[in-house]
Image (cartoon, rainbow, N blue to C red):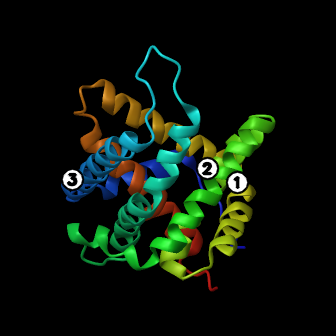
Amino acid sequence: VPEYDFDIIEIIKEGFSRIEGVKGIFLSVFVVYMVIVIILQIILGIFFPSPPPPAEPNLVNQQIVTILSYPVVMPIIVGIMMLAINYSRGEAIKFESIFHYYHLMGKLALAGILIYIMTVIGFILFIIPGIYLSIAYIFTLPLIADKGMDVWDAMEVSRKTVTKHWFKIFGLFLLLSLFMALGVLTFGIGLIWAVPLLFITLYGVLYPMIFNEFEV
C-alpha cells in the first residue's frame, strides 16, 4: 500500500490551478453522464416503479433501478475519472474517451454493486461503517481501469490506502461536495468550476500523487 500525505487546502489550490482550459470538457462530460443517468432512471422506473413524493417510496425498486443502471453508468463515470488522471499525466484529453471503458463493463459494474452492498450494510449496522466505506472505496474504479486490478484487490487497495489518511480524505471530499452544493445553489453557474475541481482534485492531483508509482 503506497505511503503518502497531503494538505487539504494545498491540494484544493493545486486542483483549482489545473482546471483552467479544461472546465468546458469536464462540465460537458458530466452533463452527458447526468442525462444518461436520468434517461436510465426513467426507463428502468417503468419496469420497477416507485410512487412520486409525498407517497412512501418503493425502496426495493429504487435499489433495483440503481443496480441495473451500473453496467451503463459505471464505465462513463470511470471515463470521467480517467480523463482527470490522463490530463494529470500530460496526455491530450478528448470528450469521446469517456466511452472507452465499456470493455471493463462487467468488472466495473461488479465493483459498483459490491461497494453499494458493503456501504448499505455499513449504514444499516451503525451508520459510521457506511460513511467509512463510502470514502474508503473512492479509488476502486480508477484502480481497475488504470492499473488493471481485479475487483476485490482494487477495493482492498483503495480501502487500505485511504484508511491511512481517512479523515483528511473525508475532509477533502466534504469540501469538494460543499463546492458542488454551492454550484447547484447558484442556479448551476458555480458547477462550471465545481465539477472540474471535484474530478481534477481527487483524480488528477490526489490519485496520481498516491498511485502513479504504484505497481500491481
Q: Is residue 94 visible?
A: no
**Which residue is rendered at x = 75% and y = 36% of the image?**
124
**Which residue is rendered at x = 27% and y = 34% of the image?**
190
> Where on the picture, by quarter, is residue 114?
bottom right
Q: Position of residue 43 (x, y in %)?
A: 32, 46
In the depicted structure, whether residue 72 falls above or below residue 88: above
Q: Is residue 173 visible?
A: yes
Q: What residue did someone put label 2 on?
A: 169
Q: Amino acid at mark 3?
A: Ser
- Of residue 214 and residue 156, the one placed in the foreground of this image is 156
- Tell me whether the residue at label 1 lies in contact with that at label 2, contact meaning CB atoms closer than 8 angstroms: yes
Q: Amino acid at mark 1?
A: His
**Which residue is rendered at x = 22% and y = 33% of the image?**
189
Question: Element under label 3?
Answer: helix
Q: What residue did someone put label 1 on?
A: 165
Q: Quadrant of the C terminus?
A: bottom right
